[in-house]
Image (cartoon, grey):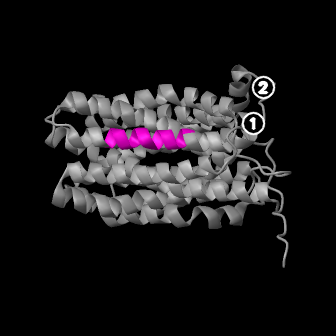
Amino acid sequence: MNSTEATRRTSRAQASTASGFFSGPAELLAFVLPVVAAQQLGASGAETGALVAVQLLVSLLIRPLAGRLVDRCGSPGSSAMIAAAGSGVGVLSFLVFAASTTLPPAFAAAALGGIAGALFWVAVRALIAERDEGSGVGDDRFAVLMENESSGAWIAFIIGIPLFQVAGPQAVFLACAAACLVAGVLLARIGAHSPAQGEPQQSPTSDSAHLLRSLRGILALVVVLAFAEGIISLLLILHLAVELGLELGEIALVYLPGAIVLSIAPRPLHRLVRRIEPRWILLLGLTCSAGFAAAMVTRPGPVALAVLWVLSALCFSLLEPLLDRLIAVVSGHRAGAGFGYAQSAELIGTAAGTLAAGALFGAGAWHVATIAAAVVLVIAALTGWRGLRRFPAEAAPPQRERG
């Protein structure tokens, strides 16, 4: 391994660590924002939905632009600095949330949060996708990224929920701002120790339309997986909060075992299945996820739901790093644009799934929602199995030199 490869691997490790500090506040915000909007800011149901939608819409619009910016800058150091800028905007967003006593500042903070997430996640994934000399992206780098993201999320919940109950939302938002600041510092250090500019970028051989055509099968899978996850996640929260009457901390405890699995399972699972063709991994993961969705029909209790969520977490531990790797492979040197499109597709799927779940739950159509999610996942598994035939299994990892 030469010094350049060693530097890139160190940069990827630091970027993955930074992702945990950024992911935790983002996941915690998604969990507590509806409560804060309703209880602290006096928002109606429609206003609460609009507050969440603003962040989603801004992020959806910015992510493709962030991808193009990353590709235009063209170096790992530039990607790190763009991600650090996203962290900085995240700090500002949480500070505005902490200072908000009415809805207009909260809407501004939500818009800033959308910008922050777009810059951060697209740039970090493009940095992680950076190829080493003579190698591809077939190692476990995206599994490591998922573990760090998930670790940040459950640690944020363990700290944030009690802090919310004891000190209130302002203290939580300030703590989240501090975590984003740490992420920004880690990424800025990568940028400072990387070359200021990469090699001059050649004009891409394929334009954006060509890249979209190349990615369309994978993007369809991303949308479907996010759609089903959006349905199941919201139904799970509504079931626990509305039908079972659990408090915020009790709901978090149901999620905690699955969140811990997401922080430890991706790498071992990746190493277990790395010699298997991606289409078979996809078929297994989506079919098991469909089983989890179908099991929700019985309206299980908290303990059973926690067990089912652990099994679902194992499926996501297989699927999400796989899809990230395939996006990186297909996008090549346009990884920024590829991940920009993919993350926009994920947001579209999540929004559609959440809207569908809310409408069906409100109409008392629990069985329709859960079965629909299961059917969608089965169809995606079968079509994805056919669509991913062109992707071979990973090559055996190179032997490390001794001595």
Residue 400 falls left or right of residue 24: right
What residue does disc 1 label?
333
Contact flag, marks 2 and 1 (Cβ < 8 Å): yes
- Give the spatial CA distance, label 2 vs label 1: 8 Å
Q: Residue furthest bottom?
A: 403
Residue extent of the magenta highlight: 82-94
Q: Position of residue 375 (x, y in %)?
A: 52, 41
- Amino acid type at circle 2 is Pro
Residue 266 placement (x, y as % from top left): 59, 61
Number of residues whose C-alpha sits closer than 10 Å to that of mark 2, classed few (under 14), some (14–19) or many (20 or more): few
First in sequence, mark 2 or 1: give its number: 2
Residue at mark 2: 204
Q: Is residue 53 visible?
A: yes
> In the figure, is residue 102 to the left or right of 399?
left
* Residue type pointed to by label 1: His
Coordinates of residue 33 in the picture (x, y in percent): 27, 43
